[in-house]
Amino acid sequence: MVRSCRPRQWVKNVLVVAAPGAAGALGQPEIAGKIILAFVCFCALSSSTYLLNDIHDRREDRENPRRRNRPIASGELPVGVAVATAIGLALLGLAIALAVRPWLAVVAASYLALTGSYTLWLRNVAVADIAAIAGGFVLRALAGGVATSVPVSRWFLLVTTFGALFLVTGKRYAELRHSDGRRLVRAALREYSERYLLFVIAMSASVATTAYCLWAFQRSHHAKLSWYELTVVPFVLWLMRYGLLIDQGEGHSPEDLILRDRFLLSMGAGWLVIFVVGVYVVA
């Protein structure tokens, strides 16, 4: 059951910290408590959708060398138990969201609707499949702002949206590149070409960088030092490094790639240090 809930994927839910963190609100005890509850909420919701995905794909997974050992596909976890657990986790996540703030429950319900639609339909529709996964990241980030009543700026939404699109398209590019003419595991991949996906990757990185720079330069007017502007350097270098790894076909698992590449980790740490100093020390 634990393996089917994919706790390694819960790291994606750390995005709920993004909006209140960027606003400098993490030092407030009531804000921290709401962020923790929002994180737990989305861990329950995401695990529910992973179970739904594995239930829906169990027959297809049995024919896949990498996925045939998943608990539901192998029969180790009975389908009935998985269905009951998925429903229970979805209700738990919605209940936590409602307890924090009604608007968070709306975001949580939207996340369930989007991920459910992806599993049942959208993943077979080219472009919609990429947009749906990216939308899940955006809803996570939006949830942090909604849970803590922190206003979410247009720049934040732009960076989050196109940053997510960058990562998701890189994953699709890796899948297509390593298919080697074999039967494609995703129906939508038949509609894509490597050139088209590289175009989307470049476009996403360009928009995310532009939006981030505009945000940083705008915020720097209110700071004593140009700490926000300094964060542009590790941000851009991070995107450049990840783009190189995508070009090498290494985008299969973004979370694993980010955690094992030393350059990405160092740029991420550098960005975090500069950002924290700019928001919580100098400001």
Image (cartoon, grey):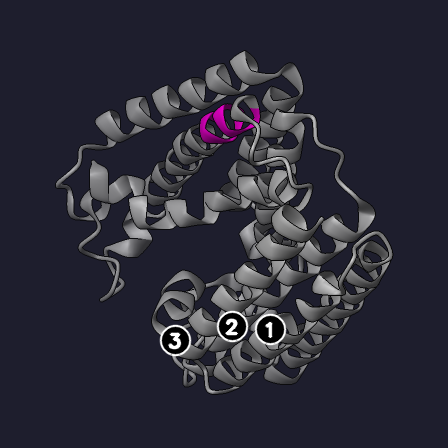
What is the residue that sits farthest to the left in this orientation? 76
Name the chief secondary structure element in magenta. helix
Residue pictured at 38% horizontal, 42% vertical = 50
Name the residue that disc number 3 marks.
Answer: 261
Residue pictured at 83% horizontal, 63% vertical = 217
x and y percentages locating residue 259 in the rendered image: 37, 65
Horizontal placement of 116 versus 193: left or right? left
x and y percentages locating residue 178 in the rendered image: 41, 81
105 or 59, nearer to the observer: 105
Q: Are marks 2 and 1 in contact (CB under 8 Å)?
A: yes
Instruction: Report the Cα–Cα distance between label 2 and label 3.
Output: 10 Å
Name the residue that disc number 1 marks.
Answer: 234
Q: Which residues are magenta?
A: 31-37
x and y percentages locating residue 83 in the rendered image: 31, 27
Instruction: Report the Cα–Cα distance between label 2 and label 1.
Output: 5 Å
Residue 267: assigned label: 2
Is 90 within the magenta? no
| SS state under label 2 | helix
Horizontal placement of 252 versus 82: left or right? right
| SS state under label 1 | helix
Amino acid type at mark 1: Pro
Query: Is residue 207 in view?
Result: yes
Structural crowding at the residue carrying mark 1, measured as other residues with C-alpha within 10 Å and reported as few (<14), some (14–19) or many (≥20): some
